[in-house]
Each structure stands twice: as structure tokens, then as C-alpha cells.
Image: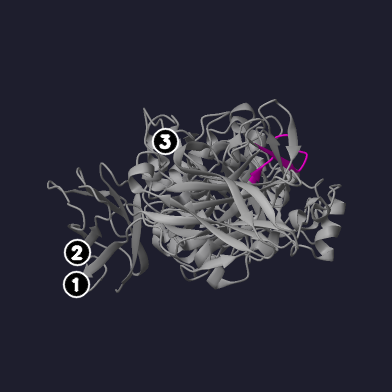
Amino acid sequence: CCEDRFVDGWDLECEFNNTDHRTELNGVEQLIVRRGQPFTINLHLRSGEYQPGGSALNLTVETGNCPQPSDQYGTRASFGLTDQIDTSRWSAAVTSPPGYMVSLSICSPPDAPIGRWRLTLGQGGLVEFVLLYNPWCTGDVVYMDSEEKLMEYVLAQDGIIFRGSWKYLIPTPWNFGQFEDGILEACLRILEMNPKCLRNPGKDASGRKNPIYVSRVLSAMVNCNDDKGVLLGRWTDDYDGGVSPLSWKGSVEILRNWDTNACQPVRFGQCWVFAAVACSVSRALGIPCRVVTNYNSAHDTNSNLVIERYVDENGQVVQKSRDMIWNYHCWVENWMTRPDLKPGFDGWQAMDPTPQEKSEGVYCCGPIPLKAIKEGELTYKYDAPFVFAEVNADVHTFMKHKDGTTEKIISSVQVGLKISTKSVGSDRREDITHLYKYPEGSDEEREAFTKANHQNKLLQQQENAGLLIAIKVSAEMRKGCDFDVFAVVTNNTPNGKKCRLVFGSRAVSYNGILGENCGFKDLLNVALAPGEEKRVPLRMNYSKYAENLTEDNLIRLAALLLDYGTREAYLAVRNVVLENPEIKVRILGEPKENRKLAAEITLQNPLPVPLQNCCFTVEGSNLTGGQIITEKLNSTVEPGQDAKVKIYFTPTHSGQRKLVVDFDSNKLCHVKGYRNVIIGK
């Protein structure tokens, strides 16, 4: 008879188990497994042979951060050997023939809490392991039935985040790096440092069964507004004590900085950084996740589903309301079922870690099913009204006169445009607007608004087929160049019109905060014959806009048309993005695992002034060893000349990887680029 006290040692088979559980990229020094799936431990007996039916072994598992683990709350379980594994509960079975070494197959239930666990092998010792969500397991609520999607939304360590404007979408590379050294430890520490865990660790540990609960915790902990969270947000140009959010190329440095600096917030983040870090943590824990971008994103501060904007008599925004329209806003979607809601609301759930408004007293948002937003189900958990407004709010524009009076003006501004995410298996953009809203003007859209107890926005748009104003732009608007933009005025009435046209431009940040003037024109007497169209140019000179641009390279154009006859005002607004130069990356040599590789990186100076203090930084999951490579140029780069460096790195794993590049200088900053590198074995 071989009782548990005769266990002399054990082998956790980390390499085999981690590979089988798709966690080997975390390393094979620690046992990391997914719930609802068996893993193997080999026991070495002190004496005697194992004989089926004649041997006893008692096993106990307990969550690692729970002071009083409980069978009732799923944070503890005791079990013995059975003939075969039961994947619905904690169970163990012998899979080896009689002998001096016993192979145990052990399985957790598919709803076990994730995190650190301890396994006690009778009197034979203690085994520690990490348990993650398992989207490959049909019994797990994060189950996803497509291997291709799982490769993208769980295992992909890099990706594309869309920025820019809805007229000019900019794909920005990002290194999620969820399997890099130390990142899983940082993610588990995020769970352990959350206020709910600190207040009641037992209840929190039990709550980790549920990805709804964990997603909500992550939404709060990725920002530091209420807790020892990861990132501090800043939406001004003052980044003293930290770095510009545009400096980050990936999540690895951010999570390591937070983890190694006593959980002090990393400075600074903005929406795409918050979303990217949340995506890294979600994927690390096993929740399928993707970053999405909503263009013309409404920030409704008073929950009335209406954005009120005020402009002065020159068409420039005056800040009277906290409501804003962000040029774009990023959040994440996590994949899970929603057993807490009626059927039909499983799948992608929106979750936003950017601190904007409080939810249940904390700066967090979501998760809320995309279908609930689309159907106008605003009573569903969590934070449906806020997300609904981001993609569906009405926009009311008022002119504020010098005497203090206001009047509503005609403006065709829509929110929730070109909602975008990276396509599965490629860097192309996937438009997912249809997952959030029905087509404009459809019966379904009207029904959704009625359900949301909100007046149909189609009825609130004042249609006018008389005077029209629009803004057209040049085909190429590169940073460093002079170019023209145009106000296009059309008179569709049978009568001649006399109007005033005010056409201005100002620097603007992506979240709608206005900067300095970049060009202005005021035409007091614009005459329009019946049916006539006029194009009025506004010259954008580099010498004028260069010093005023924010890091976002955005200029807001506003054209205000006043009809002297009817006293009606018409407003057209458009944000334009100035294009940065392309970073060219040329791979030198054949990319192979564990073989040194070189890349030549080039950027041509597009500005009419020299560039100094030029610096390229490079990183990539499984390419640069989890480190950032920096190469500085000692020489000045004159207009039209190339800044060029050669960097060396050693890939550690085969497959397609993203080499992410950033360029900085005294006059040209945060230029992003990347190159997909296919690494052979």
C-alpha cells in the first residue's frame, strides 16, 4: 500500500503542461494552467510501488490570497483519487501503470476562481500554480469557438490601435506583450491590489470565478483615480514627472514600472493607452479581448443623451458645458456569456478603463453587452447609458451672442462613426459600427431610441435644403507643408443670398480641447446667385501652425455661414490630421529563432527646418527580449535628408511578430511605424 506520506517528490511537468494549456510563452519555470482542463503531475514514491485500489492520496487546493478558503465559495476543495477525471469539479486520477512513479491527472472546474493556487499532496508537500480563464473550454463562460479568433484575441502579443479622425484613420502599432517576463505577475498583483480584495479578500477571491466581476475590477484598476491603479491620466501638454502618452509603444514597460515601483501610478496615459493596457491584462488572464476605437465619441456628463455645444459669433467653441465630443475614444471589448441577463446578450462586452465618469462611486465603466447598446436596453448592467451616449447621443449646437443670448443653429454633427478594430489575422481595419447601432434612419434605430426613452434624433435634426456649407480638404496634408482647405457654400434656393462667412482653424487635442489659432478668414459679403456654389480657400501655413499643434497633429476647421436675410446660422466642423512621414524598416538577413538579426530604420525629414536630438526606439514581443532598444543620432538631419540607424535583436520564438518603432526629435515627435517580421524555426 502506498499512502500519501510516502510521496518523496514530484515533477510539475511545467513544459508539457504549459504547452498543453497554451501558456508556454509565459515561460516553463512555473506551472500555469487553464481551468476546466486536466494537467499532469508526476509523483516519486519514497518506497514501494503504486497499486490501483490499494493506495490512498488526499489532495487539497486553496486559492493563494484567501485567508479563510471555503468549499462553499469555491476557494477551497478536498478530493481523492477517482477512476477518471471529472471536468465539472476538482478531481484527480492516476494515468500511469503500477510503479515507483505515479502520473496524476488533475482538473479544476470550468468556473473555478482564477489566480494563485496551492495544491497540498496529502502529507507529501505543497505545489503552487496559477489558474487562468480557459476560452478553449466549452464549459468556461469565456469560451470562444474559433481557433483563428483565439489566436488573435488571446494569444496575439501585438496589434493595431486606430487613431486619427474618422476621415483619416491612423493605424498605430502596439506591443501588448502579455507573455513577456513578469507581466503575468503584474496582472495578478493588479487583482490583489484592488480595493475589493483589500477589504474582503475571501469574497474577492470567490468573485474571480466570474469574468464580469474581473472585467469591472480591471476597468477600475487600470486607472489610478480611486486606488493603487496602473496609470495616471493627463490631457494637457504638461507631462512633468512623467512622459507623454504618445511615448508608449506597448504595455510591457508600463506594467513593469507599476509592479516594480510599489504600485505607484505610471505617468501618463490617455484613452488608447488605458485601453491597450486593459487588453494586455485581459488576454494575460485568459479573457478574449480587443481594442476598439469610436470616432466622434460623445462624452455625456449629465446622462441626458444629448451633447450641447456652444459657439461664438466666429464659429469657435466656447466652453459652457462639460459635455464633449472626442475626436476618437478607445475602449476594449471582452468576450463572455452574461448569465446575469436574459438570453441573447452574450458575446462582446464593452469595458472602458479611461476615467471619465463614476460608476457605483468608482471610476470604471462596463462590462455592457454590445447588443444592449444596439437595442437601447439602458437598464442592463453595467453603465449602458454612458456607452449608449458615446455612440448615439444627439448633438445640439447653440450660438452664444456677445449680449449673452443663445440661439440654436443648424449643424450636421453625428457621433459614433466608423467604430473600428483590428481584423482577425491581419492589420486591416474591421468596421464594427453595426454591432453598436442600427443604420441611421432605419426602423430599428427608431425603435432602439424609443426603448431608450430618448426622442428620435432624426426628428431633432433640422433639415434645410436651402443654404448648405461643407468643408473640403486637400488630398495630402503632410506635417511640414503648406496646404489649402476650403469652405464650400451652396445656395439651393431660387433667390440670391447675401451672407457672412467666417472660416477659422485651431489646434485641437484628440479629446476636443481647443488650442491656438492656426489661420482665420472673415468675409462680410458673400453673394450667392440661385444655384451657385463657391469654394473659399483658407491657407494653412507651416510657419503659422507649427508651434501651435498638439502632439495629436490635429487641426479643427470651423466654417460659420450667416444668412443676412433670414438671420439663420449654419455651422460646418471638421477635424483634419496632418500626416507624419513614413518610417521605413528593412530587415537584413533571414529571420530565424535565436539568431541575431539586423533592421535598417529610415525616416526622411519632411520639415523645412533641421531636426536635432533624433532618437529611434524599438520593441517587439519575442523579438527584443522584453526590452526597449534605443539608438540616438549624433548629427543634425537637414530638410529632405534621411535619419537612419541600424539596430540588432535576437528573436526567441517563431511566427509573425511586430517590430514597433518610434521616432523623436526636437521638432518632430512620436512618429510611429512598424514592420511585421516572420520568424522561422
Instruction: Say whether marks 2 and 1 touch (CB < 8 Å).
Output: yes
Label for residue 258? 3
The magenta segment is 298-310
Label 1 or label 3, whichever comes before in sequence order: 3
Q: Quadrant of the C terminus?
A: bottom left
Quadrant location of residue 433? bottom right
Compared with 203, 607 (above or below) is below
Cα distance, mark 2 to mark 1? Answer: 7 Å
Cα distance, mark 3 to mark 2? Answer: 31 Å
Question: Would you name the residue on which mark 2 appears?
Answer: 598
Q: Position of residue 50 (x, y in %)?
A: 50, 62
Quadrant location of residue 544? top left
Secondary structure, mark 2, is: strand
Q: Position of residue 242 (x, y in %)?
A: 37, 32
Q: Residue at x 49, y 35 (%)?
A: 235
Compared with 12, 614 (above or below) is above
Q: Is residue 89 visible to us here?
A: no
Q: Which amino acid does the dot numbered 3 rest on? A: Trp
Cα distance, mark 1 to mark 3? Answer: 37 Å
Q: Is residue 547 left or right of residue 491?
A: left
Q: Is residue 602 left or right of residue 142?
A: left
Q: Which amino acid does the dot numbered 1 rest on? A: Gly
